[in-house]
Amino acid sequence: MKKKLKIGMIIAYVVLILYAVVSLFPFLWSAIVSLTPMRYTENGVTTGTDIMKWPPEINLFKWPPEFFGAPATGENYVQVFKITPYARWILNTIIYAALVTIGHLIFDALGGYAFARLRFPLRDLWFALFLATLMIPGHVTLIPNYNLMVRFGFVNTYYGLFLPKLTGVFGIFLMRQFFMAIPREMEEAARIDGASIIKTYFKVVLPISKPAISALAIYIFVGTWNDFLWPLLMTSRKEMFTLTVGLDFYRTSYYTYWQYMMAASIMMTIPMIIIFLIFQRQFIDTGVSSGVKG
C-alpha cells in the first residue's frame, strides 16, 4: 500500500513539474527576448534579431549570457521609457485599477451585506435577477456604456475609465456568501447593545471580513490591471493609454519591436506576481470559506 502511495506521489509531482514548466515557459521566453539586443542596419533602421528561429541560440555559460548569438543587455528596458511615455502609462494603470478596486470594495460589500442580512420586498427575486446577469456577455454592454461616456464627455478621461466599472455582480455574490457565514449572534449582540445597522456593519461585520475583502481586492485589481478592451475603447490619446493598450504601440504595420514589447510586458507582469505572492494566503482562504456556507 505504501509503495503504491509513493508511486502515486511521484507521478503527481512529475505532472505538477511538467505543468509548471509549460506554464512558466512563455514568461521565460519573454524574459529572454527582452534581454536580447536590438540590431540596426547601416541606414539606422531597426531590424532586430531572428528571435523566432528554433532552436534558439542560448549560451548561459558566458557572462553576460548570450541569447540568439548576442550578449544579454538591459538596454531594452531603458529604451521602453525613452521611446514611449511608459511611466505615464504605469500611472494611468495604477489610478484606473485603484479607483475600480476601491469602488468594488465599497459597493460590493454594501450590496452583499444587504442581500445577506437585510430584509426588503422581493429580496431573493432581486438577487436571482442579479445572478442572471452573469450569463450576459460583457461585450453586450460595451456599446451602451461607451455611448453613455461619450454623452458625458468622459472619453480620454479617468472618469470614463473607472465609472462604469465601480461594482459588479460577482463581487456582490462573493461578499454575500461570506457575510452569510458570519454567525448572526455577533450582530444581534451589537444590536442589543444599541448599535444601529450601520454601526454594526462598520464595527462588527467589516473587521471580521478582512479575508473576503482582501480576496476581492486581489481579484478586482489584477483583473483591472490586465483589462484591455475597455481602456482601448475609452482612450485614443497616447497620454491616456494604460499598459495593456500601450503594448500595441511597439507594433507597426510592417514590423513588431519584440524586444521592447517583451520588456514592457515583463515590467507590467512583475507587480501582479508580487501582489499575489504577498496576499496568496487571504486569496486561497477566502476562496474556500466563501463557498462552504450560504
Image (tube, rainbow, N blue to C red):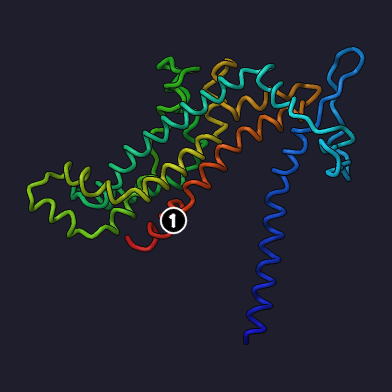
Q: How crowded is mark 1: few (under 14 residues within 10 Å), some or many (20 or more)?
A: some
Q: Residue at x 27, y 49 (%)?
A: 115
Q: Which residue is drawn at 38% across and 57% down?
A: 290
Q: Residue at x 73, y 48 (%)?
A: 25
Residue 170 in view of the camera: no
Question: What's the amino acid at mark 1?
Answer: Gly
| Residue 103, quarter of the rendered image | top left
Along the horizontal axis of the image, is 147 left or right of 269? left
Task: Indicate the quadrant containing the N terminus: top left, top right, bottom left or bottom right.
Answer: bottom right
Whole-percent x, y for residue 83 in the image: 69, 17
Along the horizontal axis of the image, is 273 left or right of 189? right
Whole-percent x, y for residue 126 in the image: 29, 47
| Residue 269, quarter of the rendered image | top right
Whole-percent x, y for residue 219 in the image: 47, 44
Q: Furthest-top residue in view?
A: 43
Whole-percent x, y for residue 175 in the image: 34, 49
Along the horizontal axis of the image, is 210 left or right of 19? left
Q: How many marks?
A: 1
Q: Furthest-front residue in view?
A: 63
Task: Indicate the quadrant containing the C terminus: top left, top right, bottom left or bottom right.
Answer: bottom left
Residue 183 in view of the camera: yes
Q: Which residue is drawn at 54% across and 42% down?
A: 274
Residue 253, placed above or below residue 222: above
Q: Name the residue under label 1.
A: 287
Helix, strand or loop under label 1: helix
The one nearer the camera, 14 or 108, is 14
The one nearer the camera, 104 or 69, is 69
Q: Furthest-bottom residue in view?
A: 1
